[in-house]
Image (cartoon, rainbow, N blue to C red):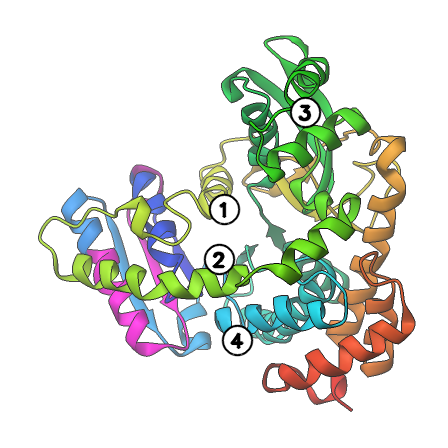
Amino acid sequence: MAGIKIGYVGGGSTRAPGCIAGWLNHGDDFAGSEIVLIDIDAERLDIVRRLAQNMADYQGVDIRFSATTDRAAGLTDCDAVLSSFRPGGFEARYLDESIPLKHGVIGQETQGPGGFFMALRSIAVIKDLVADMQRVAPKAMLFNYTNPVNIVAQAVTQFTDQRVISLCEGPIIFPAEVAEAAGLDPKKLDTTMIGLNHASWSTRHLYDGEDFIEKVRDAWEAKRGGNELTAQQRRLLHMTVAQNSIPAQYFKYYYFKDEILEELQSAATTRAQDIMRDVPRFWQHYEELASSRTPVLNPDLARGGMELLEIAIDVMDAMFNDKGEVWPVNVPNRGAISNLPDDMVVEVPGFVDKHGATPIASGAVPAQVAGLVQMLGEYQAATARAAWEGDRHQAIQALASNPLVMSLTKAEALYDDLADAHRAYLPERLLA
């Protein structure tokens, strides 16, 4: 392929080295390209740049890496921009997880009030990022991996003409998780999942050409009375059998809300605290590779291993090399899912070629689960609107519509506590 210029916003993050390993695995597909690492942390950015170029040189891959803390300069004349950042870092994620628990509401990275405030913070940055792109890289495609990917993409497509594809590996991973819980081989699966990001269900579920759900039902009956299954596996199998469809694992927060809330409230640490405990170990490994003559990333010492963001690289490859491949994408519906609005960003199989990602007609979200998905879709639209142009009043309206909140008094109390905790990352209009 002809080399392209790619801006990676979040290029100094803990997950960046794993993403870079993915690019290098696609080295021939991106030969002659320049990847500009963009981040606000100059010290970590330099570590990742040296590590990246060191790995590329060692593997003989023709990709050049540069780095800058000047976002507009890094984006100038880019053909593609990968967005994968976390405003406020894992410290902000800890607040998203812990503060809701004090109000008797699940705290989680992309769901409920935690996901809502991550959306507010992320969109505040994305709004400026898109403005920069339209000024210095007007032809670039935005490949978004910043969470919550559906709400970010909803805001960008609703309020700008910026081309954007949001991405998540969930539709590939979720069926495999169910198969493994059932003691079946994920390689024999043939599935299609549709809906919203972190809120999709399977409409095609075959296992070696036969009905996968029936095989899961047999496994559930055989295993449900024993101690073999973890809590996560038990919930996945239960939801699959109860709804006759493979779920995104995040539905556990809705269908097992009370027991998960109790588990989170009694846990000694949150997920963010567990990650922060490992962060120094990640950076020690990255610094060693940045100076090594034989730099090989250890997936056990890399945040997210080496597969995180892989789908973003695959989709970028399919577009710029005009491969005409089908990948799960988050794009405006345009009739692909019959029981969701046309302008809603949905997660659906998309045909990816040089023109971008075209959603493939995929029928309807199964009737037995459509109500919750539609409710989450309306919450998605309301949150995108509040984050992009709204005020405190509109934001509380959106938060109150979230199925994990569904209480005006709780929404007001949650909003005030979380907005105060995150005020450094929120626009003034959301604080007034």
49 is within the stretch colored magenta: yes
| Residue at 49% over, 37% down | 318
Range covered by the magenta-colored residues: 28-53
Q: Residue furthest front?
A: 226
**Residue 82 visible somewhere in the drawing:** yes
Q: Amino acid at mark 2?
A: Leu
Dot 2 and dot 3 residues touching (CB under 8 Å):
no
User: Can you tell which mark lies on residue 88?
Assistant: 4
> Element under label 1?
helix
Mark 3–mark 4 distance (CA, rounded to whole Å) = 41 Å
Q: Residues within 10 Å of mark 1 (few under 14, many from 20)?
A: many
Q: On the image, numbered disc 2 is attached to which residue?
A: 82
Q: On the image, numbered disc 1 is attached to which residue?
A: 312
| Residue at 86% over, 56% down | 378
> Element under label 3?
loop
| Image quadrant containing the N terminus | top left
